[in-house]
């Protein structure tokens, strides 16, 4: 067994925070992309809401998140009126870029290979462009109006969501 630890584990909390901020800036303001399978929310499955890093506006609900094996968090749809889409011709490809409507932050791209039963779209989003608010904190952080949508749509974590909602009442 090796005593070696991942490089990030050896960094002081402040250094790690600075690295995280630098990555967020690169992704959101320089239209960058975090490395596949490395994002904080790629393999994350908790009930709550994903919001814009800059203005805190709701972007995606956990109940619209699905596993797609693409290497980034994938959602079937954004919160209504939260994102804009534009043609992206970078890297010799034709893609549709997804940006936050409020802060104009680059979030990722949308593809037409998502689950058919959810509309057929896959919003492939960089974790570094998001902040997650857990279900139990949504009311106090001002996102209470979205709780029923998560509860209504959340089939995969319905028991966990019920427990959290029961504690909140």
Image: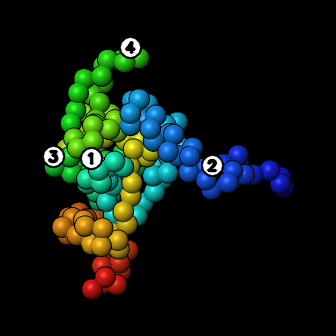
Q: How far apart are the two marked residues, 2 and 1, measured between alpha carbons? A: 34 Å
- Mark 4 secondary-structure assignment: helix
> Are the two marked residues, 4 and 2, in contact with CB atoms closer than 8 angstroms?
no
- Give the label, 4 or 3, closer to the camera: 3
> Are the two marked residues, 2 and 3, in contact with CB atoms closer than 8 angstroms?
no
> Are the two marked residues, 2 and 1, in contact with CB atoms closer than 8 angstroms?
no
In the picture of the structure, the residue carrying the numbered disc 4 is 92
In the picture of the structure, the residue carrying the numbered disc 1 is 76
Looking at the image, tell me whether mark 2 or mark 1 is earlier in sequence order: 2
Question: Relative to residue 161, is residue 96 depicted above or below?
Answer: above
Residue at the image point whose x is 46% and y is 34% from the top: 26
Looking at the image, tell me whether mark 1 or mark 4 is earlier in sequence order: 1
Looking at the image, tell me whether mark 2 or mark 3 is earlier in sequence order: 2
Residue at the image point whose x is 80% and y is 50% from the top: 4
Question: Relative to residue 163, is residue 17 depicted above or below?
Answer: above
> Are the two marked residues, 3 and 1, in contact with CB atoms closer than 8 angstroms?
no
* Location of residue 131 (image quadrant): bottom left
Q: How far apart are the two marked residues, 1 and 4, measured between alpha carbons? A: 26 Å
Q: Position of residue 124 (x, y in %)?
A: 36, 39
Q: How far apart are the two marked residues, 2 and 3, measured between alpha carbons? A: 36 Å
- Mark 3 secondary-structure assignment: loop
The disc at residue 102 is: none
Looking at the image, tell me whether mark 3 or mark 1 is earlier in sequence order: 1
Label tally? 4
In the picture of the structure, the residue carrying the numbered disc 3 is 81
Relative to 161, is 21 on the left or the right? right
- Give the label, 1 or 4, closer to the camera: 4
In the picture of the structure, the residue carrying the numbered disc 2 is 15
Q: Position of residue 102 (x, y in %)?
A: 23, 44
Q: How far apart are the two marked residues, 4 and 2, measured between alpha carbons? A: 35 Å
């Amino acid at each position: 067994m090796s005593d070696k630890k991942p490089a990030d584990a050896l960094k002081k909390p402040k250094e790690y925070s600075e690295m995280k901020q630098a990555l967020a800036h690169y992704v959101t303001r320089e239209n960058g992309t975090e490395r596949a399978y490395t994002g904080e929310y790629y393999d994350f499955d908790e009930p709550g809401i994903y919001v814009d890093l800059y203005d805190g506006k709701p972007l995606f609900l956990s109940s619209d998140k699905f596993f797609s094996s693409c290497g980034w968090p994938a959602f079937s749809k954004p919160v209504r009126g939260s994102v804009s889409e534009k043609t992206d011709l970078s890297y010799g490809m034709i893609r549709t870029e997804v940006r936050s409507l409020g802060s104009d932050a680059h979030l990722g791209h949308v593809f037409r290979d998502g689950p058919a039963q959810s509309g057929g779209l896959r919003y492939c989003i960089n974790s570094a462009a998001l902040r997650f608010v857990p279900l139990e904190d949504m009311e106090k952080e001002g996102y209470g109006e979205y709780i029923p949508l998560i509860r209504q749509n959340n089939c995969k974590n319905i028991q966990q969501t019920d427990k959290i909602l029961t504690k909140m009442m």
